[in-house]
Amino acid sequence: MRLCDLHCDTVTLRPDINDNGNQLSLDKGAVFDAWIQCFAAFIDDSDPHPEQTAEFIFDFADSQFKKYGERILPVETAADIDRAISRRKCGVIITVENGAALGGQIGNIQRLYDRGVRLLTLTWNGENALGFGAVTGSGAGLTAFGRDAVRKMERVGIIPDVSHLNTRGFYDVAELTEKPFVATHSNAFGVCNHPRNLTDEQLAELFERGGLVGINLYPLFITGGQSATFDDITRHVEHMLDLGGEHAVALGGDFDGADMDGDVKSLADIPQLYEYLLGKLPESTVNELFFNNAYRFFKENL
Ligand SMILES: [Zn+2]
């Protein structure tokens, strides 16, 4: 099977990327016939030096990608994706989780792009210079800086990620952008009413705009509890498909960013999830979800 996953926090934890006791490693991914993985540099809302932390994580990631250059190919362009697949390497897309990494400087968008960043999650859980996280409960939209940043990102070529962002901010992004945007790791509020999940209206907007939604495997966002089964995950997939998401639903596992329990505990369980879904949905739909939708999106938008 082939996998294109939109979110993990593995490099933020700074383990050996090949062989570690975490939820995601090159070893665990060796089973995939093709594998494109987004690796996020995560910045905490309380980090007093967000720009430096981002640089520190990028440097660590670069050193690991070099160390395992035989098995990894950094993806910065559409052509890199096919290069990674044909060479049977893990295609790595660098992302940043938390617009705090900009340090309030619009010029840092170009700097992030030059470091290979192709996706930026605008907020994390709290408030930052761009806007408000969904769990703040704030009804405010993006700040003036946040609006400038989103426009600039579109010009430079960094895709806005609305996972974690509050509802009003989501609609600001929809209004400010012409190109598609993504929710890398969010589920359906209609199935599990956690504020981190997206309402039917938000999902419909993303689908209509040609965006992507990555199914998050953190049980809290699947069931509201501490454990989730393959069937619980399937309900989010089916709900999104019912809303017209056949060509927009992807996977955004959140490995190494969340406590996982139940049927999916790590990347090693993904092939079983794939098999389970094959018993529920047409094979073509399952392949869209695990790989094709995100592959097509990145081919068109990188
Ligand atoms: Zn996250």
Image (cartoon, grey):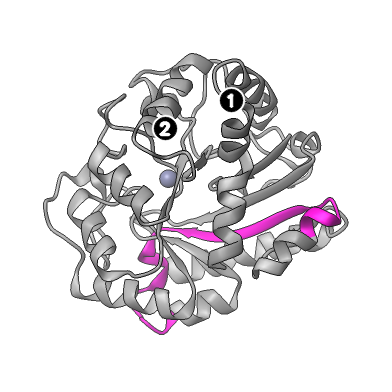
Which of pointers 1 and 2 lies earlier in the amino acid sequence? Answer: 2
Q: Residue at x 37, y 64 (%)?
A: 99
| Helix, strand or loop for disc 1 | loop
| Quadrant containing the C terminus in the rendered view | bottom right
Q: Which mark is residue 282?
A: 1
Image coordinates of residue 292 in percent, x first then y, are: 62, 46
Q: Give the residues in magenta.
A: 84-108
Q: Which mark is residue 241?
A: 2
- Can residue 48 be seen from the camera position used here? no
How many neighbours does mark 2 have within 10 angstroms: few (below 14), some (14-19), or many (20 or more)?
A: some
Q: Tell me if 33 is positioned left or right of 179 in this view.
A: right
Check if residue 8 falls in the magenta segment.
no
Image coordinates of residue 111 in percent, x first then y, are: 51, 80
Q: Tell me if 134 is positioned left or right of 249 in this view.
A: left
Check if residue 100 falls in the magenta segment.
yes
Within the image, what quadrant is residue 283 found in?
Answer: top right
Q: What kind of residue is marked 2? A: Leu
Q: What kind of residue is marked 1? A: Pro
Above/below status of 42 relative to 62: above
Ligand 1 sits in quadrant: top left
